[in-house]
Structures are given as C-alpha cells and as structure tokens.
Image (cartoon, helix red, strand yellow):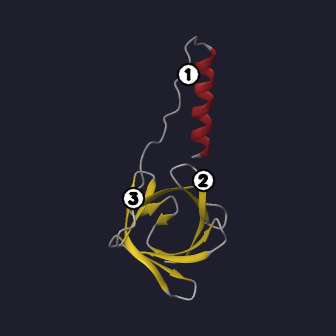
Amino acid sequence: MKKLFLTAAACVALAACGSNEEPAPAPVDTSVPEVGTTATGDMTGTYEIQMADGTVTRQTINADGTYVDSTVDGTETERGTWRQEGAQMCFDPAGDEAEACYAGGAPGEDGSFEMRDAGGSVVSTVRKVEG
C-alpha cells in the first residue's frame, strides 16, 4: 500500500511539472457519522462530564434515544431524550426545560473531548467511562 501511494504521488508530481493548470483541490469529507456513533465509535454508554465550573456528573446515553444524568454517587438529577443533529448532540430534558444542542471536539489521547454550546464556548469536558 505504501509503495502504491508513493508511486501515485510521484506520478502526480511529474504530471504537475508539465501542466499550467491549477491542481484540483483534495476532496473534502462531508459525511456525517451514523446516528448513535462518533469518531470514536458507538455513543451509547456512561460518560463522566466535568462542567466548566468544575462540577462532575455522570450521563448514561441509551440506544433507545434516552439519557439519564446523575451525581457521581448515583443520585439521578435529570432524564430525557437525545438525538444527533448533524455534528451536534441535542438533549431534551423531561419537563419544561428547553432542548439544548452541543458540538463535540476531537477526542484527546485519553478519549476525552470538549463540548461547546451554540456560541462556541466550552461547557464541559466529557470522557466515556463505561460502555
């Protein structure tokens, strides 16, 4: 595979030498991950969430489109439904509270990633702990 890539790169470089045309831009991957998956795989499972103020909670994402938030000791604090909207995760708590959507950043070496609100502010750091 490596030889094939190097051979193709050499051919492109040689072809570019004799051409006055601009090289075609590389294709951009605009695909959206399958619902229920992220760049790191299946989204279902339990996550540790550290909020911007330092508070730590747990969130369990279920395959049936529901979620449950709890304290680290297991006391339930919220439940509702979740959905994926393009590159965003949207959470709709049960009751009168409005749905909120967040965009995730690229996972770090430990698998954690930042969640950002609609304004681009980091609201939490998320790490999958079970699942």
How many residues crowd around disc 1 within 10 Å: few (fewer than 14), some, or many (20 or more)? few
Q: Measured from the top left, where is residue 80 in percent x and y?
A: 37, 72
Can see residue 27?
yes
Label 2 and label 1: CA atoms lie apart by: 37 Å
Contact, CB < 8 Å: mark 2 with mark 3? no
Foreground mark, 2 or 3, reads: 2
Q: Nearer the viewer, residue 44 or 12?
A: 44
> Which of pointers 2 and 3 lies earlier in the amino acid sequence?
3
Three-letter code, disc 3: Gln
Q: Residue at x 52, y 24 (%)?
A: 24
Dot label at residue 100: none
Q: Secondary structure at mark 1?
A: loop
Which residue is the site of mark 3?
84
> Which of pointers 3 and 1 lies earlier in the amino acid sequence?
1
Three-letter code, disc 2: Ser
Relative height, residue 89 to residue 2 (above, below)? below
Relative height, residue 75 to residue 39 (above, below)? below
Foreground mark, 2 or 1, reads: 2
Which residue is the site of mark 1?
23
Q: Residue at x 45, y 67 (%)?
A: 43
Q: Residue at x 60, y 53 (%)?
A: 121
Label 2 and label 3: CA atoms lie apart by: 19 Å
Q: Measured from the top left, where is residue 95 in percent x and y?
A: 34, 72
How many residues crowd around disc 2 within 10 Å: few (fewer than 14), some, or many (20 or more)? few
Three-letter code, disc 1: Pro
Q: Quadrant of residue 66?
A: bottom left
Q: Residue at x 53, y 32 (%)?
A: 26
Which residue is the site of mark 2?
121
> Which of pointers 2 and 1 lies earlier in the amino acid sequence?
1
Q: Measured from the top left, where is residue 46 in percent x and y?
A: 50, 77
